């Protein structure tokens, strides 16, 4: 099933719905993520793209809540916990370094997106369910970065992953030239 090309705007990177696309072997779906998907599917019966986005972002926060990654303010990462997790999960130092740099970058990037109009609108929708968008912004960013920067031998060359990578590249070009 092909995705339509998202509109290019300040939030185009959030319009690709990549957080559930595991296109890189370095960034895999965890059992806890699957549990959160089922839990939130019971709570949010989505029929619109906005409702689906709310579902995905609440699922992301649920997933992060099952780790020690999320700070108590729900708007920061405990980078020491992230590093410890990556050290225990990844055998290759290069992979670990790439993922850790990605989490540092995505922590900052998520905070920069919070004031965006689209993210504020998402936050209002999520608040009804007791969720905050930060964890979803981080998870979406990590997924995007893994799609864009996955080592070639680890990238899944499926039509969906290739198409998503192309869409993300278009979005990045748009954001680069817009600023």
Image (cartoon, rainbow, N blue to C red):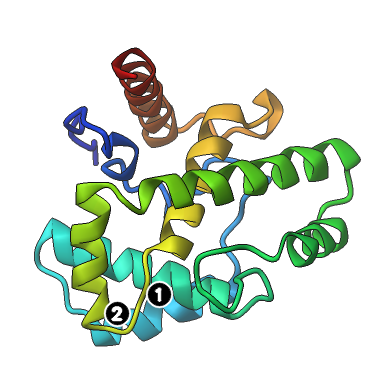
In which quadrant of the rendered view does residue 85 lie?
bottom right
> Which of the labelled discs sits on residue 145, or is there none?
none
What residue is pinned by disc 2? 41
Instruction: Tell me the quarter of the image containing the C terminus.
Output: top left
| Residue labelled with disc 1 | 37
| Count of marks placed on residues | 2
Decide: few, some or many residues near mark 1? Use Cα within 10 Å; few <14, some 14-19, many ≥20.
some
Question: Residue 52: image x %, image y %?
Answer: 22, 64
Q: Nearer the viewer, residue 106 or 163?
A: 106
Q: Report the quarter where the N terminus lies.
A: top left
Q: Residue at x 50, y 65 (%)?
A: 75
Q: Is residue 25 visible?
A: no
Alpha carbon of mark 2 to alpha carbon of mark 1: how far?
6 Å
Q: Is residue 36 above or below residue 148?
A: below
For residue 177, which quarter of the picture?
A: top left
Q: Eyeballing the image, is 110 above or below 47? A: above
Q: Quadrant of residue 57?
A: bottom left
Residues marked 2 and 1 touching at CB (< 8 Å): yes
Residue 87 shows in the view: yes
* Residue visible at 66% across and 24% down in the picture: 152
For the point 53% across and 75% down, which residue is it?
A: 73
SS type, badge 2: helix
At which x and y percent is residue 146?
Answer: 57, 38
User: Residue 94 at x, y = what percent?
Assistant: 84, 35
């Amino acid at each position: 099933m092909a995705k339509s090309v998202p509109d290019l705007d300040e939030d185009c990177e959030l319009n690709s719905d990549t957080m559930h696309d595991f296109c890189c072997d370095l960034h895999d779906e965890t059992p806890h993520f699957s549990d959160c998907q089922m839990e939130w599917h019971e709570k949010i019966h989505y029929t619109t793209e906005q409702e689906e986005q709310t579902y995905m972002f609440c699922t992301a926060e649920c997933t992060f809540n099952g780790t020690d990654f999320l700070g108590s303010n729900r708007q920061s990462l405990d980078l020491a916990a992230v590093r410890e997790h990556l050290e225990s999960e990844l055998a290759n130092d290069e992979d670990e370094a790439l993922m850790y740099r990605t989490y540092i970058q995505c922590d900052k990037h998520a905070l920069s997106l919070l004031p965006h109009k689209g993210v504020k609108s998402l936050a209002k929708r999520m608040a009804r369910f007791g969720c905050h968008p930060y964890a979803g912004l981080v998870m979406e960013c990590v997924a995007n970065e893994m799609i864009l920067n996955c080592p070639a031998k680890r990238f899944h060359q499926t039509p969906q992953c290739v198409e998503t990578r192309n869409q993300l590249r278009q979005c990045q070009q748009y954001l680069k030239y817009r600023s």
